[in-house]
Image: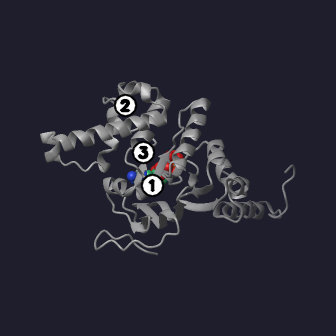
């Protein structure tokens, strides 16, 4: 397994076969807790990939490892073949943008201003130019505003451009987070529970929005608890359970998988430690009562 390096030169880009994201062997430990264990995941250009798993499975921690918020204990994350730095603004600059499970807008700024903030990684005007407010700066400012307005149109927020972010209904705040993330012109967008707290109508609109984002050339990796949303949207789905990738495949394959059903229903997986422990308990009980542990109990 390759360990992420914090020093030395970045390796030269390599042929990724259309992969925008390649995470390999990503492990994240917090003291004695391994939140993410040896996870590989690839997202290719034009794909929408879902990441699902029960509460506490390690999904957000994995996102944080991809976006430079956490330095993985082990593993490598590449974007278009180049190992990513462990700085979130550099990851955004490289081409990965994200939204957060708990909305992180600038509450006292307007909708338009929030999107303009999202553009700062794509504007080349320096502090000096900004202070002088010369013609080059004003042109860049106009271009940024035009692009921000396009994104508000794209996400259906044009009418709200001058509203304070904190006054938007919840569903529109989530849309604004997406508009702001798109302002950095990402090749890959990571969405952390984009439909949390949304009505059914808003959820359907979010699905349409994600499909439109893909049409515009941005690949998407999405965490979501709403299974219907995931299975109706994604080309591929990966399932994390207790920090490990349990299965990855088409929505059809994943939703039929017994282990996935068991993970969500909370019953032990066949052949996994939960079942072995249960068998031990049965054997011990049988020993103490003098019955055969392999015999099914009456009534079952
Ligand atoms: N900064 C941290 N320090 C210590 N433990 C952490 C930290 N962040 C996450 N964890 C732990 O790592 C595990 C995975 O958490 P994580 O939030 O990644 O799960 P999740 O799959 O995103 O859950 P949910 O679906 O509920 O959001 C949990 O046991 C959590 O308590």
Local SS, label 1: loop
| Residue closest to the eye, 161 or 36 | 161
Report the Cα–Cα distance between label 3 and label 1.
9 Å
Classify 18 as above or below 99.
Answer: below
Pointer 1 residue: 187
Local SS, label 3: helix
Q: Position of residue 4 (x, y in %)?
A: 38, 69
- Numbered mark located on residue 219 in the image: none
| Residue closest to the eye, 237 or 44 | 44
Q: Is residue 184 visible?
A: yes
Figure quadrant of residue 146: top left
Q: Residue at x 66, y 64 (%)?
A: 272
| Residue closest to the eye, 32 or 27 | 27
Classify 188 as above or below 145.
Answer: below
Local SS, label 2: helix
Q: Residue at x 37, y 48 (%)?
A: 184
Return the disc, 2 or 3, that comes first in the chain's sequence: 2
Q: Position of residue 206 (x, y in %)?
A: 55, 38
- Residues tagged 1 and 2 counted as in contact (Cβ below 8 A): no
Q: Position of residue 288 (x, y in %)?
A: 75, 62
Q: Position of residue 148 (x, y in %)?
A: 37, 38
- Numbered mark located on residue 111 in the image: 2
- Numbered mark located on residue 182 in the image: 3
Report the Cα–Cα distance between label 2 and label 3.
14 Å
């Amino acid at each position: 397994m390759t360990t992420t390096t914090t020093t030395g030169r970045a390796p030269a880009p390599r042929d990724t076969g259309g992969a925008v994201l390649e995470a390999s062997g990503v492990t994240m430990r917090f003291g004695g807790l391994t939140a993410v264990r040896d996870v590989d995941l690839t997202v290719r250009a034009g794909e929408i990939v879902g990441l699902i798993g029960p509460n506490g499975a390690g999904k957000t921690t994995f996102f944080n490892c991809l976006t430079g918020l956490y330095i993985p204990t082990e593993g490598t994350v590449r974007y278009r073949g180049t190992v990513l730095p462990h700085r979130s603004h550099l990851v955004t600059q490289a081409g990965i943008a994200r939204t957060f499970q708990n909305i992180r807008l600038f509450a006292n700024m307007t909708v338009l201003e929030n999107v303009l903030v999202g553009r700062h990684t794509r504007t080349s005007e320096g502090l000096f130019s900004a202070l002088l407010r010369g013609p080059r700066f004003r042109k860049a400012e106009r271009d940024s505003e035009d692009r921000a307005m396009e994104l508000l149109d794209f996400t259906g927020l044009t009418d709200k451009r001058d509203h304070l972010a904190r006054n938007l209904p919840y569903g529109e705040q989530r849309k604004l987070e997406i508009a702001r993330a798109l302002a950095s012109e990402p090749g890959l967008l990571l969405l952390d529970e984009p439909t949390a707290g949304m009505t059914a109508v808003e959820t359907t609109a979010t699905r349409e929005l994600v499909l439109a984002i893909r049409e515009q050339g941005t690949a998407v990796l999405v965490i979501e608890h709403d299974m219907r949303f995931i299975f109706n949207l994604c080309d591929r789905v990966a399932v994390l359970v207790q920090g490990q990738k349990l299965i990855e495949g088409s929505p059809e394959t994943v939703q039929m998988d017994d282990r996935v059903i068991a993970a969500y229903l909370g019953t032990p997986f066949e052949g996994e430690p939960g079942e072995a422990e249960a068998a031990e308990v049965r054997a011990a009980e049988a020993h103490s009562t003098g019955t055969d542990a392999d015999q099914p109990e009456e009534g079952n």
